[in-house]
């Protein structure tokens, strides 16, 4: 799987390493992703998602069911 959050859509960004002499070389900024299992009580089953730390905070705040409904409406799942 690619390094993309399944809830927020965060993905790898590209930037520069800048040295003290101001030389620039390409680098990548990776999102803080974890693979987590979530229990959905409405469907009585577990699902595994690759989510960012920000998405975990959103799930804690809104609940897994609401977050999954929003992601499906936006076409991310």
Image (spheres, rainbow, N blue to C red):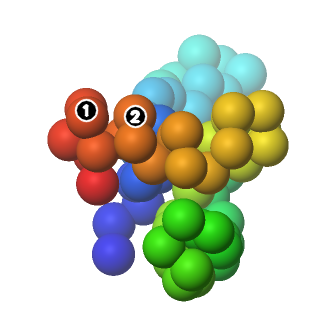
In the foreground, 29 or 17: 29
The single residue placed furthest to the front in the displayed view is 42
- Picture coordinates of residue 59 (x, y %)? 69, 44
In the foreground, 9 or 26: 9
**Would you say 60 lies left or right of 75 here?**
right
The residue sitting at 40% across, 42% down in the picture is 69
- Picture coordinates of residue 29 (x, y %)? 54, 41
Vertical relation: 22 (above or below) 3:
above
Q: Dot 2, crowdedness within 10 Å: few (<14), some or many (≥20)?
A: some
SS at circle 2: helix
Vertical relation: 65 (above or below) 47:
above
The single residue placed furthest to the top in the displayed view is 22
The residue sitting at 69% across, 33% down in the picture is 62
Spatial CA distance of label 2 from label 1 is 6 Å
In the foreground, 47 or 52: 47
The single residue placed furthest to the bottom in the displayed view is 45
Do the residues under discs 2 and 1 have CB atoms within 8 angstroms? yes
Q: What residue is disc 2 on? A: 70
Quadrant location, the N terminus: bottom left
Q: Which mark is residue 74?
A: 1
SS at circle 1: helix
- Picture coordinates of residue 30 (x, y %)? 55, 49
């Amino acid at each position: 799987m690619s390094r993309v959050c399944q809830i927020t859509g965060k993905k790898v960004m590209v930037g520069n390493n800048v040295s003290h002499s101001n030389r620039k070389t390409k680098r990548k900024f990776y999102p803080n992703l974890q693979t987590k299992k979530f229990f959905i009580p409405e469907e009585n089953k577990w699902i595994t998602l690759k989510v960012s730390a920000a998405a975990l905070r959103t799930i804690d705040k809104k609940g897994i069911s609401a977050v999954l409904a929003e992601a499906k409406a936006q076409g991310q799942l």
